Image (cartoon, rainbow, N blue to C red):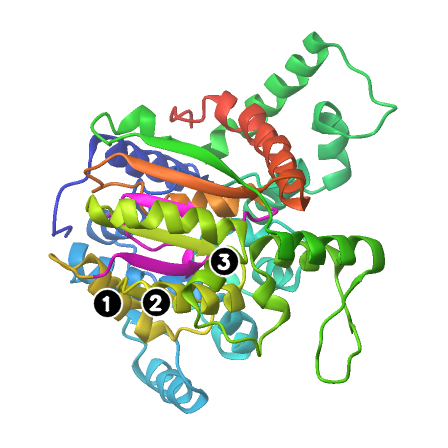
Amino acid sequence: MLQGGELRPYQLEGLQWMLSLFNNNLNGILADEMGLGKTIQTISLIAYLMENKGVTGPHLIVAPKAVLPNWIHEFSTWAPSIHAVLYDGRLDERKAMREEISRDGKFNVLITHYDLIMRDKAFLKKIHWYYMIVDEGHRLKNHECALARTLISGYQIQRRLLLTGTPIQNSLQELWSLLNFLLPNIFNSVQNFEEWFNAPFADRGDVSLTDEEQLLIIRRLHHVIRPFILRRKKDEVEKYLPGKSQVILKCDLSAWQKAYYQQVTEKGRVGLDNGSGKSKSLQNLTMQLRKCCNHPYLFVPTHNMWQREEIVRASGKFELLDRLLPKLHRTGHRVLLFSQMTHLMDILEIYLRLNNFMYLRLDGSTKTEERGTLLKKFNAPDSPYFMFLLSTRAGGLGLNLQTADTVIIFDSDWNPQMDQQAEDRAHRIGQKKEVRVFVLVSVGSIEEVILERAKQKMGIDAKVIQAGLFNTTST
């Protein structure tokens, strides 16, 4: 039933692991590092169950809106005989789909996104689903969120499978939330889970354990959760995948940036000439400091931005880009640039136009159907586009952009896993060149604090997941 290629050995092992869960009436988390083909492994599971077990569905796949086209594309490539339905669109379009589904119900897989799981629950909960597969399953990390509660109690589901490249993002409680969704009868108390396992990672001053005690508790955690998680890293299974290197580039603030940064720090406001001579009061101090680090034009949207020298000299990060990008362009590299701020992306667009760099842009406002077109344009043979501008949250999930070999993180996310996902848009199966990642950090600023916090958060993942030997099929 599978077409379009052959599974790699580790992907076959992933299929065997999921079948072992199926045979033992268990649910699990496929937590392979991003870029190792969790989508294809999942499609192979559905195909195997149809062909060998007589399980024809219906299955429900819940994914971020941005990756819905990719799911449909992969089904049509790998398993065209499986009837996969994309449930999305305007209210009238969805109404027509609901009527068609109610009339004949001839589909194997329904693919939709998180918002519609909530919005159209009245219809979707009536269907008896076999598998519910949640892509980017870490969205369920808060067990009290409406999405998690709805999926746990509001739907009729026989089996559950979570797909995530980042099973732990901030705390052990998040891991418990995923396990509670999968196996609510086993992992039914977050308090007990934390009492047993959280001590080595707690920030409280009253917890003092020896290294041996910490190691014992971590081993206990590994032993308990190992049957339910399969995690492989690229450097373990893809011997021929080129490497990835990261360089942190420290940028000095310009005089203009320093003045704004000082005003925000001392007064919580920036003295802007908005026509009335009054200063502008600022909300969310941290965000305003981050804006200072990116570009002062973020505070003066009416400023004439079409002066090349001024747009560069106003920001330390732009000065660095102005040295880096021409070299990358001359030597044939292609760049993914990620930012948290869409207004900053507007300024970057002006800079790229002033320098005649061809680029594409994708952010949260990009329509689902446009995303696929943009990806095709960038990934096409002999594509003329030098850069892809992406917002970290919208463009860091599920996109295959391995035709780029350079990633620039213009401003880091508080959650380091978001930046990791962004980097892995390029560093994934199919990449033929070494991927270089440049992280821009303003010296002596809030960004250095964010970088340090990121190291601490990644330490939890290293202790619990990376050290747990979850690359073995132990069920």
Indicate the amino acid at tag 1. His
Is residue 172 visible in the rendered structure shown here? yes
Compute the Cα span from label 1 to label 2: 48 Å
Q: Nearer the viewer, mark 1 or mark 3?
A: 3
- The residue depicted at 51 percent of the width and 21 percent of the height is 467
Q: Nearer the viewer, residue 331 or 422?
A: 331
Q: CA distance from mark 1 to mark 3?
A: 30 Å
Residue drawn where x is 41% and y is 50% of the image: 321
Specify which label sits upstream in the sequence, 1 or 2: 1
- Up the image or down, 83 lies above or below 226; here it is below
Residue depicted at x 23% and y 52%: 47
Query: Whole-percent x and y of residue 94?
Result: 40, 84
Of the image marks 1 and 3, the number of the one nearer the N terminus: 1
Q: Residues within 10 Å of mark 1 (few under 14, many from 20)?
A: some
Label 2 sits on residue? 354
Mark 2 to mark 3 CA distance (whole Å) = 27 Å
Instruction: Estimate how packed mark 3 is, as few (under 14), some (14 to 19) or many (20 or more) residues with alpha carbons within 10 Å.
Output: some
Image position of 344 with respect to 452: above or below: below
Quadrant where the C terminus lies? Answer: top left
Could you say whether the residue bearing mark 2 is in a helix, strand or loop?
helix
Residue named by callout 3: 393
Front residue (pair 131, 273) = 273
**Sequence-first tag of 2 and 3:** 2
